[in-house]
Image: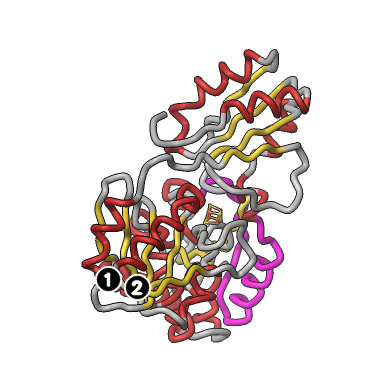
Amino acid sequence: MKGFDFEEERIKQELTRLNAKRVLLQMPEGLKPEAPRIAKIVEKTGAVAIISADPCYGACDVATSEAESLGADLIIHFGHAKMLKHEKVPTLYVEARATLTVEAAVVAAVPLLTEYKKVGLSTTVQHVQTLDVVREILVRAGKVIEVGDAGRLPYAGQVVGCDFSNAKSVAANVDAFLFVGGGKFHALGVALATGKPTVIADPYGGIAYSVGAEVQKILKQRYASIEEASRGKTFGVLVSLKLGQKRLEEALAIKESAEKMGKTACLFAVREIQPDVLVEFPTVDAYVNTACPRISLDDASRFKKPVLTIQEFKVISGESSWENLLKGGLFEN
Ligand code: SF4
């Protein structure tokens, strides 16, 4: 696939070094079209390749139990940087860095940053290698640049959908953020987590735009969801079966807290939190999602009932407040 580095040579070397015999390939949706080609590369080394066709949204979701059930001795996980501390099945991470140039998009972003002198940079793992170039262009445009490194993620400036610690670590020192990457989701996360104006430099389209209007829309929608949920009598607490998203202890605490408020609460174990899965439980008035917070925020309009994040539930239980969420807690589970 044009535009991403699949590190084919490293894959071959690692397969030989590890003497892998059966390999499970796992990719997020955008990279999956390349899976058959990579499978053939794996097979040339003499190993059996099996492609995981299930959805995969992050490195929190390494297909360990699938690999165990298939007897795979290696997982190759594409498109994300390592997140789990230990994997039960040896796992090779191929980050699939974008090979696109970012210059055009960043140059297009400069006029949108006119009002701001100090600019924080953030990006996903696909583009972390471009931050030096981005910095150079913006410094030439008279900006002072900050790239946060809070130490929780592998790369300075990197964000993932549930961890904006790098952006937050420099938020107090900057007037605005420039997010380098495609799609709005991560940039919205930066804006919501930091409360700062955020501009996207999208290298895929060579364009730039601000997410300000969208942030206001999301905040309105989240406030309405909290309001609606607070009137609910029966709560469903969603527990993920994905390795890096499983928060059973938090789910139990939420159930207890809901019951103390006089609500009925049930725990639901689920792999893919989809609207058609939740629709099967019409007596539940609102859900609390202890899995990926992105599900609550990204897919909100597709769910028939409110699906709150843990932090949003705390507004209902009185442990937090809407004002606190506005200070950046919305995405943190
Ligand atoms: S929990 Fe969600 S946002 Fe966080 S890494 Fe996993 S998929 Fe991404």
104 sits to left or right of 245: left
Q: Quadrant of the N terminus?
A: top left
Where is residue 221 shown, x and y percent of the image? 33, 70
Label 2: how many residues lie within 10 Å, few (<14), some (14-19) or many (20+)?
Answer: some
SS for callout 1: helix
Q: Tell me what residue is drawn at x 40 percent, y 36 percent.
A: 3
Where is residue 169 shown, x and y percent of the image? 54, 75
User: Which residues are drawn in magenta?
Assistant: 246-272
Label 1, on which residue? 113
Q: Tell me what residue is drawn at x 38 percent, y 77 percent.
A: 118
Q: Nearer the viewer, residue 151 or 90?
A: 151
**Amino acid marked by disc 1:** Leu
SS for callout 2: loop
Color scheme of the displayed model: secondary structure
101 sits to left or right of 314: left
Mark 1 residue CB less than 8 A from any atom of ligand 1:
no
Image quarter of residue 111: bottom left
Where is residue 83 shown, x and y percent of the image? 64, 53
Q: Nearer the viewer, residue 255 or 44?
A: 44
130 sits to left or right of 301: right
Label 1: how many residues lie within 10 Å, few (<14), some (14-19) or many (20+)?
Answer: many
Q: Is residue 279 magenta?
A: no
Say which mark, if any, is on residue 143.
2
Marks 1/2: CA distance?
A: 9 Å
Q: Is residue 269 magenta?
A: yes
Answer yes or no: do the residues labelled 1 and 2 have beta carbons within 8 Å? yes
